[in-house]
Amino acid sequence: MSSKYTFWELCKSYDKIEIPIIQRDYAQGRNTHDVQILRDKFINEYLIKSILSLESIELDFVYGSILSEDKNDKKQNIFIPLDGQQRLTTLYLLHFFLAVKENRLVEIKDTLSKFTYETRPSAHDFCRFLLEIGEVKSLSGIKSEIEDSVWFNEEWKDDPTVSGMLNMLDTLAKNESLANSEEEILSKLIDRKNNLVTFYFTDLDQFGLTENLYIRMNARGKMLTEFENFKSEFSKIIRYNHGLLETVKDRIEYEWVDNLWDFRDNGSYIIDSPFMAYLSFLTEMLYFKDAEFRAKSYESNFLDFKILKEIYSKESNLRFLIFSYDFISDAKNYNGSILWEGESLHSILKDILSNKRDINQIFIFFLTLIYCFEGKPKNGLNDFIRVVRNLIENTDDKSRREWPRLIASLQNLVSDKNVYALLSEGIDDNKLVGFNVEQRREEVFKAKLVQAFEDYRNLIFAIEDNKNLKGKITNILLTPHIDSEEQFDETILESVIYDTEQLKLLKEVFDGYVEISQKDFNPIWGNLLGTSLYTQTYESRLIFSGSYRRHPAVLLFAKGYAKSNIGLSGYIEQFQKSYILGLVNDYANFSEIRNVKDQLLLYYIISERIYNKPYWEFFKNHNFNFGWLTKEPGYKSLFSNGIYGCRFFEDYNPIFQVYNQQFRFNLGLNQNNTLDIEIIGGNKRRNPFDLIKDWANDNQFKN
């Protein structure tokens, strides 16, 4: 059972209070920026302020084990703290400081000497000598006087525990209210009737717990100080509801440790880091949920106690916090793929607890928490997550100024109804503001499709889940109804009417798409040179679209292949021969072709069919954009009349060169990136235009 103690009573109750070897250094006295902030809040704004105003405070639980030891034929009871070392050390130093201030050290040193870092020689010796210090000339300079003492070993400054103790004494000395107080504070602190600073003590031996479990539950290593201070400060924020406060206190020591245990750093027994990362995430999202849309500025430190107080002073947010930490165990077991590349709720949670920042992930996880917190049907969770994923993934502006609006819009999808039923009934367009308009319309269309054709639900989901499409599938949904690239711009999705036959065709198109997308479409890429996938610029360039994975040209190629009922290599050959025969009808002499797309596609087909070169030898060094330069010795174009729409080469032909991001005119031709077909020499055959016509007229297609 737990009993309430003061530090003085704890010292009186045992023969020794011994910090064990498994414990970490005393870190409340560190001089890092974060610890200084926490120390100021905990010592000056909380501990000392409460003592001076005679306001009783509790410092949570202290756990430990009681050992019996025979010494000089006398049995000694030794208390071994396993959680609470930091607070106990601070209270030890506070009692020492007050005793020095009030000239009562001789009176209480026997009791204080029971507190020791027995397993740490430097800290043990420091505490022993400290109690023999005698008179301090200047209380404000107590740290310097100790360091200048004859008994002080300079090497102790390298001991983090001794260094931390000195810094804590300096902090106490610099608190003018404490240092200048004329009250006999020590008497009030040790008087049982006042109970100024107390904590609950629990003997873990009563529960038969092993040392390994002690370590797992309590050994938070170097970060424990910050975490203990956080718990103390956070408890003050939420004490307005005693029941919820006790729930947090209990679960933060047991259930949540278990929930977070798998996410600690390798080789560490620390759960503080993932705990604080999760708290920062939750606080940030709750903050933006209620923040002003497009405010002039937003907070950025979501572990600042001012922000924590603002958020968790609201009971609904506190209940959400408790639920969210409880939900970790559910998320760990939710392994169904949510995002692309196999990401699940579990993997998203792992990233969040590692402080990785991916906006799509944090929105998905936060809205999942909201959905489950509000008790919505579990069998609708997958569909809900899917729609949230599609919307957030395919919206460009996800800057923080948009977050309040985006969160509010997504909350409109949290319903007892299945999200597809909600969308198909015609959700008010204003309820999804902030998200890409086309994506919003697509989600409504897909919802109606899923509702009307339950047997094809998995097909729609499979298309959405494709890593190239990533939930944005308007173009592929249009493809069964369209036969030209121009029609994609002319047709709106809402006007399309599906039946089972068109859904079957959609499946065939998607199957074809999956096949041609292998190796990022590279094997079929050259066959797309003549399409709107490429755009000719005024500056002698031909560049491909960055959104090529959903491009109409790619999807129509997939459709043509799907309807051909022949193998991919046979379809490509058929496509190329049809293209060449079309050029024959338009041009008596291929050398007179002036359309740059026709020129390059013709070159590509010749490279593959006449010179038997694979696609990667045409798109040298994995470069897929084209530029063109003035001829130089050693290079020759097969075309003669220039390029339409090119201000530099309207009447005569240049030499083509592939490039990736930036085309440098001033560097001239580079054979490593120039098309082989235009480089003089080698084993090139004469009259390639005639040869490719002969090849095209051979109508035996491969299967």
Image (cartoon, rainbow, N blue to C red):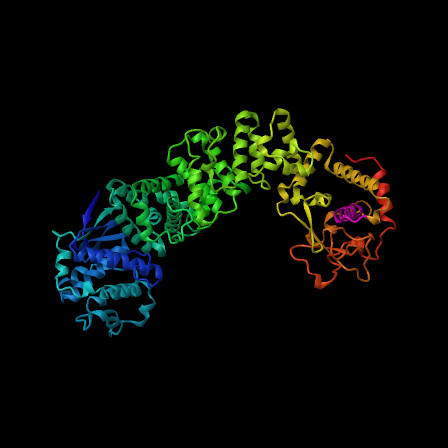
Q: Where does the N terminus fall, quadrant-wise?
A: top left
Q: Position of residue 314 (x, y in %)?
A: 30, 43
Q: In this view of the protein, which residue sits in the foreground, 616 or 562?
A: 562
Q: In this view of the protein, which residue sits in the foreground, 650 or 161?
A: 650
Q: Position of residue 575 (x, y in %)?
A: 76, 38
Q: Which residue does the image show at 19% across and 47% down from the upper left?
A: 4
Q: State the extent of the magenta-drawn residues as a range.
A: 593-607
Labels in figure, total: 0
Rendered position, 108 above or below 504 = below
Q: Main secondary structure of the magenta part?
A: helix
Q: Is 164 situated left or right of 368 in this image?
A: left
Q: Is 447 situated left or right of 43 in this image?
A: right
Q: Where does the C terminus fall, quadrant-wise?
A: top right
Q: Position of residue 254 (x, y in %)?
A: 32, 43
Residue 596 colored in magenta in the image: yes
Q: Does any portion of residue 25 appear in the rendered image?
A: no
Residue 317 colored in magenta in the image: no
Q: Is 592 situated left or right of 502 in this image?
A: right
Q: In this view of the protein, which residue sits in the foreground, 33 or 641?
A: 641
Q: Find residue 176 and report its image quarter.
A: bottom left
Q: In this view of the protein, which residue sits in the foreground, 24 or 271?
A: 271
Q: Does any portion of residue 165 appear in the rendered image?
A: yes
Rendered position, 204 above or below 664 = above
Q: Is 583 situated left or right of 353 in this image?
A: right
Q: Position of residue 453 (x, y in %)?
A: 56, 25
Rendered position, 149 above or below 642 = below
